[in-house]
Image (tube, helix red, strand yellow):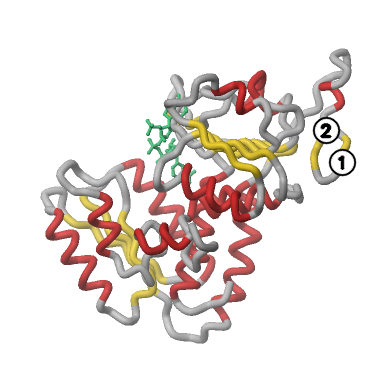
Amino acid sequence: MRRSGGFAIVRRATNPRSPPVPAQILDGRQIAQQMREKLRAARGQLGPQPIRLVSIEIGQNPAAAVYVRNQQRAAAEVGIEMEVRNLPLAATEADLLAAIRELNGRPEVAGVLVQRPLPPGIDPRVVQSAIDPHKDVEGMHPANMGAILYREPTLPPCTAAAAQHLALSTGMDLRGAETVVVGHSEIVGKPIAVLLLHRLSTVTVCHVGTRRLVDHTRRADILVVAVGKAGLVHGDMIKPGACVIDVGINQGPDGRIVGDVDFASAADVAGWITPVPGGVGPVTVAMLMRNTLRAAGATV
Ligand code: NAP
């Protein structure tokens, strides 16, 4: 693979008889590990007082349990005390809001996090809006979401910040790069598009209304896929040498976790690609820890 102006060029693209050059794997676990080491150093500068992150979960969801464990491990490594509160499955929206308000008022709590999925009858937007925006370490309070239109806020949405960090980790010059984001959800697709727009990349957002997805994905230097549909993007939809960030998390037919991008075919064409699992997910957790330290006053 040759690199020109920060972009990877795959020789096979110009000579069909050349063997495919596999993409570089953007190893989210390794990148997250490096982040945690830096965060631990930043945490040390905050002094000996405990830094507390409180996670609230209603009932006990096996999928959420994996996330909570990963968050607890990352918190312990960085030096954050993570407290996990479980409300009974019968808890109402009012119960959850009361628990959040109590935590908002406790000065020793730096961050508050509500695990999803929430049971039916509880509106995630109402819940997220109830968290003090200064303790909203997931970066999903309307104040933090709104702030990204002006600039990157102190507490950006974690998955969007992770996608941006992974794109930057390639060394690509984002200025002027063609970026295509597939998926336009409030918590993932839209904030990713805005953060990459701030880097002066030229951003196209695709969604269910997009006529021919492939026409857009094929011109992307940076392709971010955040839909939740296994195999939505194949290698033949990717520009040779592109940076592919796969945000999707899906259960494959054999029960294994897979992304939205068909990894095998995409890795033959892309310049860089995130695996699933082990790509965006670990970096998202590291971003949660970064936001918690920022909420506690660290400059990191
Ligand atoms: P979501 O709220 O369901 O949003 C999915 C988006 O994809 C919507 O904007 C939807 O458009 C769009 N979409 C659906 N079908 C499409 C198609 N065929 N072509 C183009 N766009 C299409 O999901 P989300 O919360 O954004 O999450 C997306 C994926 O990321 C999920 O797999 C989720 O598990 C994963 N995720 C991963 C992390 C991580 O840390 N790795 C964090 C959060 C989420 P409409 O709304 O118009 O239908």
User: Which image quarter holds the C terminus?
Assistant: bottom right
- Of mark 2 and mark 1, the one earlier in the sequence is 1
Callout 2 environment at 10 Å: few (<14), some (14 to 19), or many (20+)? many
Residue 47 image position (x, y, % from top left): 51, 86
Please, is residue 117 above or below residue 69 in the view? above
Residue 212 image position (x, y, % from top left): 54, 19
Q: Amino acid at mark 2?
A: Ile
Task: Say left or right for 28 vs 185.
Answer: right
Callout 1 environment at 10 Å: few (<14), some (14 to 19), or many (20+)? few
Indicate the secondary structure of the residue bearing disc 1.
Answer: strand
Judged from this view, the residue extending furthest toward the top is 17
Q: Within the image, what quadrant is residue 7 found in?
A: top right
Q: Mark 2 near mark 1, Cβ–Cβ under 8 Å? A: yes
Residue at x 24% of width, y 46% of height: 118
* C-alpha gap between disc 2 and disc 1: 7 Å
Q: Nearer the viewer, residue 256 or 157?
A: 157
Q: Nearer the viewer, residue 75 or 215?
A: 215
The residue pinned by badge 1 equals 4
The residue pinned by badge 2 equals 9
Residue 182 image position (x, y, % from top left): 52, 33
Task: Say left or right for 265 vs 125.
Answer: right
Indicate the secondary structure of the residue bearing disc 2.
Answer: strand
Q: Amino acid at mark 1?
A: Ser
Residue at x 38% of width, y 57% of height: 140
